[in-house]
């Protein structure tokens, strides 16, 4: 059984909605609702550890109540960074295995959670092949510094799953080394643990910009793939 | 697998026809949650269901005036406690007191909106808040909600709102895999129709059983292939 660490703490300045992006509406519903409902339908998820931006606990609790989320939910204040938020949420997880997800990915479905749970490895993340070329650069001088083989790169997605002990050890490693990661699959791998990837779905993208909000709304609005 | 069905306005017309259609068929719908105002017709229906129960089904009747929102909210808690789930919901209860605009009594307008619009909303919202997962919600609107008719202001307005509300429900409840269908019957031989058109020969128009047949189809395996914003059912 798993604890779900549901990241919900970002302020989302790029979406420019005048409120934390977890409360922006995608296809009419607060974006956080999609992840809560999807996770609530997954038997292997036994609890949800959910963080909230400062000042938004009441709103977050109200949404959980309004949508009658059945799993027990533990609320944790957001850290200053996503990296810190995960570190702060882990001690609240009762289970030895955790799933990480972020509410900014509203196209996640229960099948995605079940998919990562079913992966035979202890540490696994959905990832997408990169269909375009990514260049390494020196941004200070505006110069391209080489090339990267895109066949050996992946776009990191969520959900992910980890042994809690591995994820905690990876965060201890990051604290010792003074490094901050923007996501956890690479952190755990760099800290020396095996992390595997499953091919994800390009629909399960992270809503970051106003254009993303519109695209997610379109996709959630029941576009007909068969026509 | 056994499914439960809740029907509002169950005592007469399309509601009663729907109940009987599902009850007297050898199907997997076995738990009947029937809501109606207290009436001889409701008592008679419940007695009939008890006396003639060929498939050993369970029928529970709840007397309620759906214009009473606090009572409706309380009842939904009782329903979840007693039945555990509502898989099929038929929001059928309707009310009308047709009259010209200048004669509309505002309290009556409020009652019309209360029964025809607020009650379906309250039932769905409260059942969701009590942890229910619907398979199918059928809201019974009316062709009178698609075109305004003189003398039917309150009824037409309430049904127009129900049609639109159903579209929103359909979109919002898709996250649970719930199907929401709005049916707009045309002229149908119900008591409500008699109120709207007292001089009509009811034997010449669509019967409640015909609409119940459409509802049965929507709840069947093939029903999931019917995706309509507003399914017009008329003769």
Image: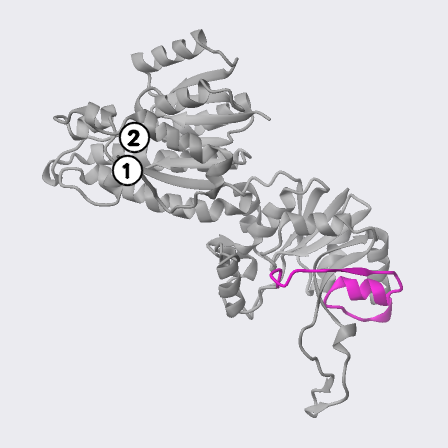
User: What span is colored magenta in the figure?
Assistant: A176-205
- How many C-alpha atoms fall within 10 Å of the one at disc 2: few (<14), some, or many (≥20)? many
Apparent side of residue B86 relative to residue A42 in the rendered image (left or right): left
- Under circle 2, the secondary element is loop
Residue at the spot 26% in from the left edge and 42% down from the top edge: B145
* Label located before the other in sequence (1 or 2): 2
Q: Position of residue B146 (x, y in %)?
A: 26, 45
Q: Which mark is residue B142?
A: 1
- Considering only vertical position in the picture, is B83 above or below B96? above
Q: From what the image shows, is residue B54 above or below residue A97?
A: above
Furthest residue in direction top, as rendered:
B51
Q: Nearer the viewer, residue A85 or B83?
A: B83
Q: Secondary structure beneath disc 1?
A: loop
Q: Quadrant of residue A2?
A: top right
Answer yes or no: are tags 1 and 2 on the same subunit.
Answer: yes
Quarter of image, res A95: top right
Q: Which mark is residue B94?
A: 2
């Amino acid at each position: 059984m798993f604890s779900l660490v549901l990241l919900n703490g970002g302020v989302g300045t790029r979406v420019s909605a005048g409120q934390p992006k977890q409360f922006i509406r995608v296809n009419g519903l607060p974006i956080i609702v999609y992840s809560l409902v999807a996770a609530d339908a997954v038997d292997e998820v036994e609890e949800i550890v959910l963080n909230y931006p400062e000042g938004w606990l009441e709103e977050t609790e109200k949404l959980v109540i309004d949508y009658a989320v059945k799993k027990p939910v533990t609320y944790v204040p957001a850290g200053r960074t996503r990296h810190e938020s995960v570190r702060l949420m882990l001690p609240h997880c009762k289970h030895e295995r955790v799933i990480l997800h972020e509410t900014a990915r509203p196209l996640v479905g229960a099948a995605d959670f079940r998919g990562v749970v079913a992966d035979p490895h202890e540490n696994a993340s959905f990832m997408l092949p990169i269909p375009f070329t990514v260049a390494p650069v020196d941004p200070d001088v505006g110069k391209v510094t080489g090339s990267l083989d895109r066949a050996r790169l992946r776009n990191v997605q969520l959900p992910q799953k980890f042994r809690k002990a591995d994820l905690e050890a990876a965060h201890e490693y990051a604290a010792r080394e003074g490094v901050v990661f923007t996501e956890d699959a690479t952190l755990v791998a760099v800290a020396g643990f095996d992390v595997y990837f499953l091919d994800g779905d390009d629909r399960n993208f992270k809503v970051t910009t106003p254009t993303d909000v519109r695209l997610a709304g379109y996709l959630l609005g029941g576009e007909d793939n068969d026509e | 697998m056994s499914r439960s069905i809740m029907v509002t306005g169950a005592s007469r017309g399309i509601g009663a026809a729907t109940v009987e259609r599902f009850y007297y068929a050898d199907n997997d719908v076995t738990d009947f949650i029937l809501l109606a105002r207290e009436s001889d017709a409701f008592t008679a229906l419940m007695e009939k269901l008890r006396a003639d129960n060929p498939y050993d089904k369970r029928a529970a009747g709840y007397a309620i005036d759906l214009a009473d929102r606090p009572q409706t909210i309380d009842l939904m808690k009782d329903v979840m406690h007693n039945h555990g789930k509502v898989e099929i919901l038929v929001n059928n209860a309707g009310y009308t007191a047709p009259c010209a605009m200048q004669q509309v009594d505002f309290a009556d307008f409020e009652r019309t909106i209360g029964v025809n619009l607020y009650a379906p909303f309250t039932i769905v919202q409260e059942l969701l808040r009590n942890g229910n997962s619907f398979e199918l919600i059928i809201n019974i609107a009316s062709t009178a909600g698609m075109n305004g008719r003189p003398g039917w202001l309150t009824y037409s307005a309430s049904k127009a709102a129900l049609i639109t509300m159903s579209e929103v429900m359909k979109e919002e409840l898709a996250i649970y895999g719930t199907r929401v269908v709005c049916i707009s019957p045309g002229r149908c031989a119900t008591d409500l129709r008699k109120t709207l058109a007292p001089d009509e020969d009811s034997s010449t128009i669509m019967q409640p059983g015909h609409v119940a047949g459409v509802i049965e189809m929507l709840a069947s395996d093939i029903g999931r292939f019917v995706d309509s914003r507003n399914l017009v059912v008329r003769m």
